Amino acid sequence: MHVSLVATVLNEAHSLPRLLDSVAAQSRHPDEVVICDGGSTDGTIAILEAEDRFPLRLLQQPDANISQGRNKAIENAAGEIIAVTDAGVRLDSKWLEKIVAPFEQGETPVVAGFFRPDPRTTFETAMGATVLPELQDVHPEQFLASSRSIAFRREAWDAVGGYPEWLDYCEDLVFDFRLRAKYGPFVFAPEALVYFRPRPDLRKFVLQYYRYARGDGKADLWRTRHAIRYMTYLLVGPLIGAAGLLDSPAWWALYLIAGPGMLWVPWRRLTRMWNHLPSFGKLQAVLLVPLIRVAGDIAKMMGYPAGLWWRWHHRGRIPDWRAAP
């Protein structure tokens, strides 16, 4: 069974070495690695051209978005099984072995791996606890794979039209939805792990979640989820405040219930990450969780309408990705 590992890169000179090191350390080596560069200017190309520990083919497509880069890499890959990951991650040494195993056991079309944060700072630890799922939170039959850890048969990729090249963010979700519509729930391989660093500061985190929500708007994803967020912040919250002012301060006690309720899950996750933190960082992380949660929600509330505006402006030119593959 020929397995191709593909990825896209753009100015990843600082993080690329740990990805390449982890590829070289795999218990099962890919038959080839195909990487598409989107126009790097920081030394990424030199690092890739110097790699000699495994067969690597470098493609260059300046100004390509992630979907275009992935599709180009897959088009040029020779494998019947395509394993996809991202720059900026570190693969567990058995990642490829575990994500390929289900294909060897049957006619599986898609395998979803898993991912975990690899934090280096207190902020990164708090962010990972706030926004990333843990394994016990996952319902395998509903899990939508991140394209930092997924594998599929080439014919499955072709059958759904590849990654949506009109979409710059949330492209892997649309790709997943189309795969699941055609083939049903994915095989879940939680041992196929990749590790990645969360965004290192609040500004980069906010920009990331703004872009994610803008992608949701472009693709018309999660209408109810976004509507609930707007209602919570723009309607319910202010109404409770007004009731406390005009009727009785007792209304404000609802904040004391709702606040910890929103933060209970990330705080619980955070306690499982104590080993990443020095003693003085534990309190700092606890206090960062609500800041990260609110900042992320605000970023999403700003990004989603921007995506909807883009969608309206491009109406008639966006493919109906919900149509049967």
Image (cartoon, rainbow, N blue to C red):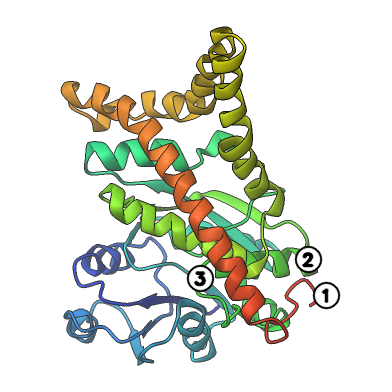
Q: Position of residue 185 (x, y in %)?
A: 73, 56
- The CA distance from mark 3 to mark 2 is 20 Å
Question: Looking at the rendering, in which quadrant would you find the N terminus?
Answer: bottom right
Amino acid type at circle 3 is Ala
Q: Which residue is mark 2?
A: 181
Can you see residue 118? Answer: yes
Tell us which disc is closer to us: 3 or 1.
1
Q: Which mark is residue 324?
A: 1
Identify the residue shown where x is 24% and y is 36%: 122
Amino acid type at circle 2 is Ala
Q: Position of residue 8 (x, y in %)?
A: 39, 77
Q: Which mark is residue 83?
A: 3
Q: Are marks 3 and 1 in contact (CB under 8 Å)?
A: no
Q: For numbered disc 1, what is the local secondary structure?
A: loop
Q: Residue furthest front?
A: 246
Specify whether 122 is left or right of 111: left
